[in-house]
């Protein structure tokens, strides 16, 4: 009876501990998602504030006003895309055959014009194959590219920031994308934990960006994402492998 009682106590304590851990993890996810939403909204909103100031400065120059209005339309469109992304969480995403280089180029062009407004000077180079069409969910895949670009930009501390994106067809069944930056890099422990939800090295981070990337690529697109190489003060290289499935 004493042994049964002791075993029961241990089981009860284990159950309580497991329940508390689960609740804590759920709480972190909800807080993280709220902060991720704020993070996603931050770029277009900050850009729009900058565009408004540019409008005021160039109020007597019609051509400058027209260009600024087009950029503001782009930011408003992005806000709509962000709303669409969050509405897809928890549901099966619709896959479409898209030109992969066009999807990446659209995201890169958007960030090239807005990184200076966010206090970042980063050169984004691309070596893309414009003949590759692949089955993806455009909104979610763009989310992955954006997260990788933002992470790279935030990791770059020198004045000559650089992100290199290379696309190649590895085999007839696989596309490989590499995202390399010259940022502060990661040590071995940081590399192991980089894709864990809630893990971050940023003072104001929330640690959901890379875990979302992993879920989008591996669960929704049946691909693979991993850190190929990273070391302190030498930068980081992320690799995405996507199956070449065309309907």
Image: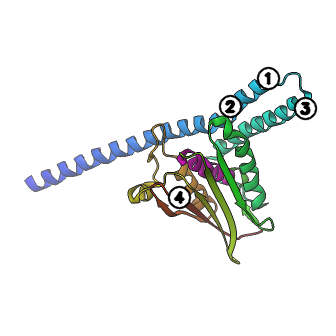
- Find the distance from the CA under tag 3 to the CA under tag 1: 13 Å
Give residue 57's mark: 1
Disc number lying in front (1 or 4) = 1
Q: Quadrant of the N terminus?
A: bottom left
Cβ–Cβ below 8 Å for labels 3 and 2? no
- Find the distance from the CA under tag 3 to the CA under tag 4: 40 Å
| Residue furthest to the bottom | 172
Which residue corresponds to mark 3?
A: 63
Tell which circle, 1 or 2, labels the residue nearer the N-terminal end. Answer: 2
Tell which circle, 4 or 2, labels the residue nearer the N-terminal end. Answer: 2
Residue 179 percent across, percent down from the top left: 61, 59
The relative height of residue 130 versus residue 120 in the rendered view (above or below) is below
Determine whether, in the image, residue 1 is placed left or right of residue 112: left
Q: Secondary structure at mark 4?
A: strand
Residue 239 percent across, percent down from the top left: 58, 64
Disc number lying in front (4 or 2) = 4
Tell which circle, 3 or 4, labels the residue nearer the N-terminal end. Answer: 3
- Find the distance from the CA under tag 1 to the CA under tag 4: 39 Å
Residue found at x 45% / y 46%:
200
Q: Residues within 10 Å of mark 1 (few under 14, many from 20)?
A: few
Per the rendered image, the range of residues in magenta is 141-156
Q: Is residue 1 visible?
A: no
Cβ–Cβ below 8 Å for labels 3 and 1? no
Instruction: State the colouring used for the structure image.
Output: rainbow
Q: Quadrant of the C terminus?
A: bottom right
Which residue corresponds to mark 2?
A: 45
- Find the distance from the CA under tag 1 to the CA under tag 2: 19 Å
Which residue corresponds to mark 4?
A: 236
Tell which circle, 3 or 2, labels the residue nearer the N-terminal end. Answer: 2
Q: Secondary structure at mark 2?
A: helix
């Amino acid at each position: 009876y004493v042994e049964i009682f002791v075993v029961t106590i241990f089981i009860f304590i284990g159950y309580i501990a497991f329940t508390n851990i689960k609740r804590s993890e759920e709480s972190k996810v909800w807080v993280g998602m709220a902060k991720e939403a704020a993070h996603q909204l931050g770029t277009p909103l900050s850009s729009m504030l900058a565009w408004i100031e540019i409008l005021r400065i160039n109020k007597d120059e019609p051509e400058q006003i027209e260009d600024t209005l087009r950029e503001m339309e782009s930011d408003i469109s992005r806000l709509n895309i962000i709303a669409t992304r969050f509405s897809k969480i928890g549901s099966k995403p619709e896959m479409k055959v898209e030109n992969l280089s066009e999807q990446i180029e659209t995201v890169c062009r958007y960030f090239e014009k807005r990184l200076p407004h966010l206090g970042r000077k980063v050169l984004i180079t691309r070596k893309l194959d414009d003949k590759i069409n692949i089955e993806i969910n455009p909104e979610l895949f763009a989310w992955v590219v954006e997260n990788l670009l933002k992470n790279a930009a935030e990791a770059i501390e020198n004045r000559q920031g650089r992100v290199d994106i290379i696309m190649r067809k590895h085999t007839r069944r696989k596309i490989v994308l590499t995202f390399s930056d010259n940022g502060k890099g990661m040590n071995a422990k940081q590399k192991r934990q980089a894709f864990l939800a809630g893990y971050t090295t940023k003072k104001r981070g929330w640690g959901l960006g890379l875990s979302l990337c992993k879920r989008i690529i591996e669960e929704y697109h049946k691909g693979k994402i991993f850190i190929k190489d990273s070391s302190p003060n030498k930068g980081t290289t992320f690799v995405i492998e996507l199956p070449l499935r065309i309907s």
